[in-house]
């Protein structure tokens, strides 16, 4: 056969194989492929080597291009969704969200590990608990789904759905310092005994919940001698009360909030420079004319001259504008009327050292409630700790804290509405782990607004959804986020015989399925893989929590301890020569063998001291 006919025959055979493969005729494809081997081999023998190399290179380039072009990528993704029913497979979890995947990033999350040699680092990673560098989302069968501790996690769940119990587990497992905000004492009661084993525990109880005494105080004027700190503190305190008020339109609300921030920052800066208190600030806001002379004299010491201009403008403006600014500021100072909150905000001679808190891996519980208007205080203290930690992180190797500071913000929209739209963008890279819990997405929208809520959700690497929500928009949002899948539909004739097979698009997770999730079940939306449905860890089922709360050691722990004691005794029950002992220790140490005992005379197993036996 000539070379031309051989080429034509080979091309026809290969084309037949491709056509059969595209029509999914697998047996025909295999048969034609075997048939095409002979002409292909003959053609290879007659072709020069350089031409074969060129053909192979060209084929690889064309195949690579076709494999990664947009249409091929979309086709593969569609096939993957159909094959996996729109959810993450076991391989996806192992590749993206497993403990081993998290430990591979340990040198980045924990810069102290990168200073070891490569062999020592690998040995450290094998022994390193995953919770030291990651947050557990849920369990799916035998696997656990994790996210890195440098990622942001938002949790959504209504009352009594297991959200708080899940958050308690993340507080217990946190490797470094932890800041906890809550409107109740249940997180403190569950986690404080276990966190005390890792470092000191502090309580800032601005509302006197359950009669729990505050062990630390925080004056909002701390650090306000710096103009930047004063501006940030004023923004934190006003942000705790201004969001979601619905006062006028959005543009009007932003205008008055901006005016109030300027005035409050100037007054707090003046009070810090003059050694005044927050009650003086309250008096200045109530009657700015009476305090104008003192405020002006104090602000002359400031390097920021704009504050003096802001106060002068506030005092000299018309009464209607001044009243609007005053009414915007006053809710942020309402806690002064609550005795417990006012006591928690008293200046402390010891101060509040954030560096020491991080070094000792301490846990700070910030408790508050809306009825006492304590949110501005809690928000101010949270902002102070987080910003100080960010400043200290810049001085550390890798520009991040090691281990990370964990911000566990339970009921964040109610008691600690910190500026998450900004913090979620860069706090993770500084070694600050953010776990924010909300009752629903609607609550997030009400507190932060549509735009800022969208920013928070986009910056979060994972969202954990508990059941219980009944809001239609929320359910439709999460269902849309989960996507669609192909569901086969079998059509039958009147005789019950299958006639056709079609495919229809259905949601991977229907809104009704999301609304009726059982208690403890969650849907985890993690960046980099499809959603998964698993079980969230409940703190009251953990062995360490049950031991602390009940005071009883589990039976398997007692069994292991008994076995260890038995092995210790067996190591002593071996033949010995006459031991050398110190007589002065015989009466004090019960394990010292008396000198009159020998290897052939001593106490036996039946308690007779006169018969030969082994040591007991």
Image (tube, rainbow, N blue to C red):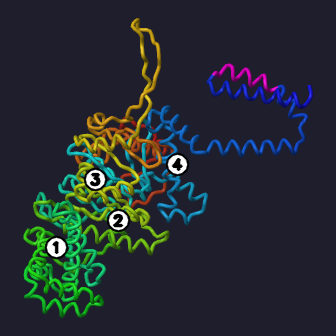
First-in-chain label (1 vs 3) = 1
x, y (%) of residue 575? Answer: 51, 43
| Label 4 crowd bin: few (<14), some (14–19), many (20+), radius 10 Å | few
First-in-chain label (3 vs 2) = 2
x, y (%) of residue 489? Answer: 42, 22
Gap in angstroms between the C-alphas marked 4 and 2: 74 Å
Q: Which residue is mark 2?
A: 422
* Vertical position of residue 413 compared to residue 477: above or below: below
- In this orientation, does residue 122 appear? yes
* Vertical position of residue 250 compared to residue 482: above or below: below
The residue lying at 10 percent from left, 67 percent from top is 340
Q: Nearer the viewer, mark 4 or mark 2?
A: 2
Gap in angstroms between the C-alphas marked 4 and 1: 71 Å
* Span colored in magenta: 25-37
Whether pointer 4 and pointer 2 mark residues with C-beta atoms closer than 8 Å, the reply is no
Gap in angstroms between the C-alphas marked 3 and 2: 17 Å
- Specify whether residue 206 is painted magenta: no
The residue lying at 42 percent from left, 37 percent from top is 611
Element marked by disc 3: strand
Q: Which mark is residue 345?
A: 1
| Label 3 crowd bin: few (<14), some (14–19), many (20+), radius 10 Å | many
Q: Which residue is mark 3?
A: 437
| Label 1 crowd bin: few (<14), some (14–19), many (20+), radius 10 Å | many
Q: Nearer the viewer, mark 2 or mark 1?
A: 2
């Amino acid at each position: 056969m000539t070379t031309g006919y051989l080429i034509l025959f080979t091309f026809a055979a290969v084309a037949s194989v491709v056509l059969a493969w595209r029509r999914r005729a697998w047996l025909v494809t295999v048969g034609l492929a075997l048939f095409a081997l002979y002409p292909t081999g003959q053609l290879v023998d007659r072709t020069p080597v350089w031409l074969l190399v060129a053909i192979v290179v060209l084929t690889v380039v064309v195949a690579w291009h076709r494999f990664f072009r947009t249409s091929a990528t979309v086709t593969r993704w569609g096939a993957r969704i159909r094959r996996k029913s729109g959810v993450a497979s076991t391989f996806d979890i192992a590749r993206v969200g497993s403990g081993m995947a998290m430990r591979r990033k340990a040198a980045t999350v924990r810069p102290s590990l990168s200073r070891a040699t490569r062999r020592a680092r690998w040995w450290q990673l094998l022994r390193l608990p995953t919770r030291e560098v990651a947050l557990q989302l849920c369990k799916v069968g035998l696997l656990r789904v994790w996210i890195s501790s440098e990622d942001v996690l938002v949790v959504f769940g209504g009352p009594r759905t297991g959200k708080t119990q899940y958050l308690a587990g993340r507080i217990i497992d946190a490797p470094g310092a932890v800041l906890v905000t809550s409107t109740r004492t249940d997180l403190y009661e569950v986690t404080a005994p276990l966190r005390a084993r890792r470092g000191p525990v502090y309580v800032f109880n601005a509302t006197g919940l359950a009669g729990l005494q505050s062990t630390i105080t925080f004056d909002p004027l701390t650090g306000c001698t710096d103009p930047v700190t004063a501006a940030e503190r004023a923004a934190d305190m006003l942000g705790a009360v201004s969001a979601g008020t619905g006062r006028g339109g959005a543009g009007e609300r932003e205008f008055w909030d901006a005016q109030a921030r300027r005035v409050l920052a100037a007054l707090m800066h003046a009070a810090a420079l003059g050694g005044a208190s927050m009650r003086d600030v309250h008096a200045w806001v109530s009657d700015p004319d009476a305090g104008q002379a003192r405020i002006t004299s104090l602000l002359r010491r400031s390097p920021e001259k704009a504050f003096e201009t802001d106060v002068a403008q506030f005092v000299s403006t018309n009464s209607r504008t001044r009243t609007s600014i005053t009414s915007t500021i006053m809710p942020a100072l309402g806690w002064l009327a609550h005795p417990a909150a006012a006591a928690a905000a008293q200046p402390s001679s010891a101060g509040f050292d954030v560096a020491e808190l991080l070094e000792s891996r301490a846990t700070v519980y910030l408790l508050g409630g809306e009825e006492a208007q304590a949110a501005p205080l809690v928000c101010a203290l949270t902002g102070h700790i987080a910003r100080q930690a960010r400043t200290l992180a810049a001085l550390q190797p890798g520009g991040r804290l090691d281990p990370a500071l964990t911000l566990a913000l339970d009921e964040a929209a109610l008691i600690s509405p910190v500026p998450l739209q900004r913090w979620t963008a860069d706090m993770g890279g500084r070694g600050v782990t953010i776990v924010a819990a909300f009752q629903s997405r609607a609550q997030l929208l009400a507190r932060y607004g549509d735009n800022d809520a969208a920013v928070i959700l986009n910056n979060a690497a994972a969202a954990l959804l508990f059941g219980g929500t009944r809001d239609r928009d929320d359910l439709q949002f999460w269902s849309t986020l989960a996507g669609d899948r192909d569901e086969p539909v079998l059509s039958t004739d009147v005789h019950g015989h299958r006639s056709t097979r079609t495919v229809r698009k259905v949601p991977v997770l229907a809104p009704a399925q999301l609304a009726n999730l059982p208690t403890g079940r969650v849907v985890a939306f993690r960046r980099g893989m499809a959603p998964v449905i698993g079980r969230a860890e409940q703190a009251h089922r953990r062995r360490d929590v049950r031991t602390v709360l009940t005071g009883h050691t589990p039976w398997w722990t007692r069994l292991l301890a008994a076995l260890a004691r038995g092995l210790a005794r067996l190591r002593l029950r071996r033949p010995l020569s006459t031991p050398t002992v110190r007589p002065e220790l015989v009466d004090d140490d019960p394990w010292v063998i008396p000198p009159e005992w020998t290897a052939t005379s001593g106490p036996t197993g039946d308690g007779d001291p006169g018969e030969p036996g082994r040591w007991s």
